[in-house]
Image (spheres, helix red, strand yellow):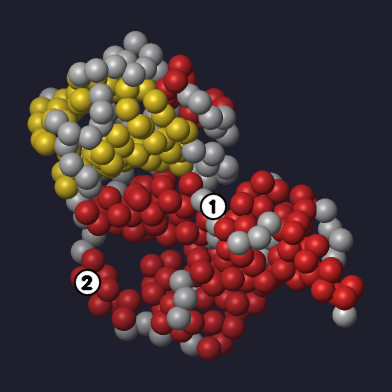
Amino acid sequence: MPTIADAQKFHVKGGDRLAFMNHIHWSARPDVTMFDNGDLPIAAMRFHRCDTVGPVEVIGKAPSQIDWDVLFVNRSGTGTLAIDCCGERRETAIHRDLCCLFPAGIDNTLRFDSNAGAFALYIQPGLLSALPETAGQAAFEPILGRRIPRLAHLIGLIEAELMRPGLGTELMIEGLLRALAGMVAGRDEARHEAECARIYLAPARLKRVIEFIEAHLDQHIGLDDLAATAGLSANHFLRVFKLSTGETPYHFLRARRIERARTLLAHGDLPLAQLALECGFANQAHFTAAFSRELGISPGRYRRSTRDKVSVA
């Protein structure tokens, strides 16, 4: 039976750390797109269909050493999804927003029609249980084919960000993973919202956070870093920062990185590869894609256009 490695069409960073995928066997060769996840603690795959007609069987045998949690959401197709997991068998009609969670270390078997398509999100071992949103919960109950629109929406936002990385992708995905972790852990959202509403971000704390962002634009900035600077928990910080600035930390960071990039392009001669590092990107390709997405023009063309304006003046 083929594995993802047999069907992979795109280079994936990570090498041996994704070896657990060799324990996932398909009865027919899958047509998949593997996302370039850079240094993020996740891997992602868009499954389009299988090169066959009729039912497909996917067997996931948990490796003896390192295994990852996996969440997937259905995107297309018809028919029935049958799941064998933890001694339980479940069958449900395929439709959008149909979600599954298979915690690390659990064997499972899926059967579905070859025309079905899905997005799968693989999460590094121990990441979910390490997040405050799960309160140290070491084990999670499997989700065997349930329609959970909010969870599907969160996974969809991660997929969209991986497809078109922005100037604050790491911060965006970290926030989405925290929200996702809270959902799979069954946290009481109404109580949590009430607690957060009582906390206010004082101007002095907000000033410290903004100064921290400005001083570390060339580095990885996580929610924990910003929350620690403000002296708050990450969840509380997310809400009060938006109340104070009108923007999420992700959008605020993105705007500051855009402004730094524009300044460096217009008033400096740094090579684009070096400029990308100054704006917090691992490489020039990601920087170029993100900058072009935000401004509708590549960094090189933006630099030339600003120099041309100066020359004319």
The structure residue drawn at horizontal position 20% and vertical position 19%, both measured from the top left corner, is 54
Front residue (pair 310, 222): 310
Residue most extreme to the bottom? 203
Dot 2 or dot 1, earlier in sequence: 1
Residue most extreme to the front? 312
Q: Quadrant of the N terminus?
A: top left
The structure residue drawn at horizontal position 14% and vertical position 31%, both measured from the top left corner, is 79
**Amino acid type at mark 2:** Arg
What is the secondary structure assignment of the residue under circle 1? loop
Rate crowding at label 1 as few (under 14), some (14 to 19) or many (20 or more) other CA atoms within 10 Å. many
Is residue 167 visible in this depiction of the protein? no
Q: Quadrant of residue 26?
A: top left
Q: Quadrant of the C terminus?
A: bottom right
Disc 2 from disc 1: Cα separation:
33 Å
What is the secondary structure assignment of the residue under circle 2? helix
- Say left or right for 182 vs 45: left
Front residue (pair 24, 141): 24
The structure residue drawn at horizontal position 38% and vertical position 40%, both measured from the top left corner, is 121
Q: Is residue 306 above or below residue 57?
A: below
In this figure, which residue is indicated by the disc labeled 2?
191
**Amino acid type at mark 1:** Pro
- Say left or right for 41 vs 275: left
Q: Is residue 27 above or below residue 8?
A: above
Is residue 106 visible in this depiction of the protein? yes
In this figure, which residue is indicated by the disc labeled 1?
165
Give coordinates of residue 229: x percent, y percent.
Answer: 56, 72
The structure residue drawn at horizontal position 36% and vertical position 22%, both measured from the top left corner, is 30
Give coordinates of residue 152: x percent, y percent.
Answer: 27, 50
